[in-house]
Amino acid sequence: MSSNNTTTEQKSNNPFDIFIVGTKKGFNIGMYSLLPNVLMAFVLTYVLQLFGVMAFLGEYCGGIMAIFGLPGEALTVLLATWLSCGAGVGVAASLFSSGTITAHDITIMAPALILMASQIQYMGRLLGVANAPKKYWPLLMANSLLMAIFGMLLMRFFV
């Protein structure tokens, strides 16, 4: 018997085994990565509405968001997306279910949800691991934000 702690697992080429392994991995990602972010977003949205922050954002950020044809409250979707894509989707779903934003609004925000998703999380995970010089990090972050703005403007005029 070997004192080696590593175990050798046989990989199966059976499509059913591959499907089961993939299903387990997908379930774990959904349960332990996506669901907590989405749940947090629903709670955060409720708390912001409870304390009047959503009304404040709607009133004071309405002019900025009107450039994209969106209500001011839609800013919370973009801010949450910048922190975590799952949270942004959760905030969008919460605002949609309360009637604050429409499916049309979500369609306009869709490019931004993709282009600037989880930038704060990925800054250290990707840029740090890739050893990208830190002097370029702001430029890389700004590029995603500018592309998100451009994407929302295009969506506003073509949707």
Image (spheres, rainbow, N blue to C red):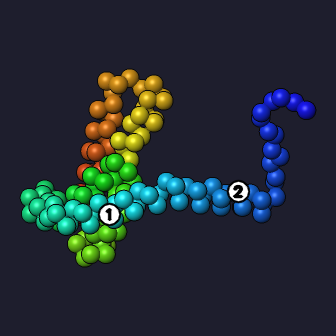
Residue 72 lies in quadrant: bottom left
Check disc 2 and report the residue beneath it.
21
Front-most of 141 and 21?
21
Coordinates of residue 18 in the picture (x, y in percent): 74, 57
Coordinates of residue 132 in the picture (x, y in percent): 42, 26
Q: In what element is the residue under mark 2? A: helix
Can residue 72 be seen in this snapshot? Answer: no
Amino acid at dot 2: Val
| Residue 21 horizontal side relative to residue 85, left or right | right
Q: Can you say whether 120 is above or below 14 in the image? A: above
Check disc 1 and report the residue beneath it.
43
Q: Can you say whether 78 is above or below 159 in the image? A: above
Residue 5 lies in quadrant: top right
| Residue 101 horizontal side relative to residue 84, left or right | left
Quadrant of image for the C terminus? bottom left
Residue located at (45% from left, 25% from top): 131
Residue located at (36% from left, 59% from top): 40
What is the distance, in whole Å, between disc 1 and disc 2 at their CAs? 32 Å
Q: Tell how many labels.
A: 2
Front-most of 51 and 143?
51
- Callout 2: 10 Å neighbours few (<14), some, many (20+)? few
Front-most of 43 and 13?
43
Q: Are marks 1 and 2 in contact (CB under 8 Å)?
A: no
Quadrant of image for the N terminus? top right
Coordinates of residue 97 in the picture (x, y in percent): 31, 75
Coordinates of residue 43 in the picture (x, y in percent): 32, 63
Q: Can you say whether 129 is above or below 101 in the image? A: above
Residue mark closest to the camera, 1 vs 2? 1
Residue located at (29% from left, 32% from top): 138
Q: In what element is the residue under mark 1? A: helix
Front-most of 52 and 72?
52
Q: For residue 113, which numbered disc appears in the image? A: none
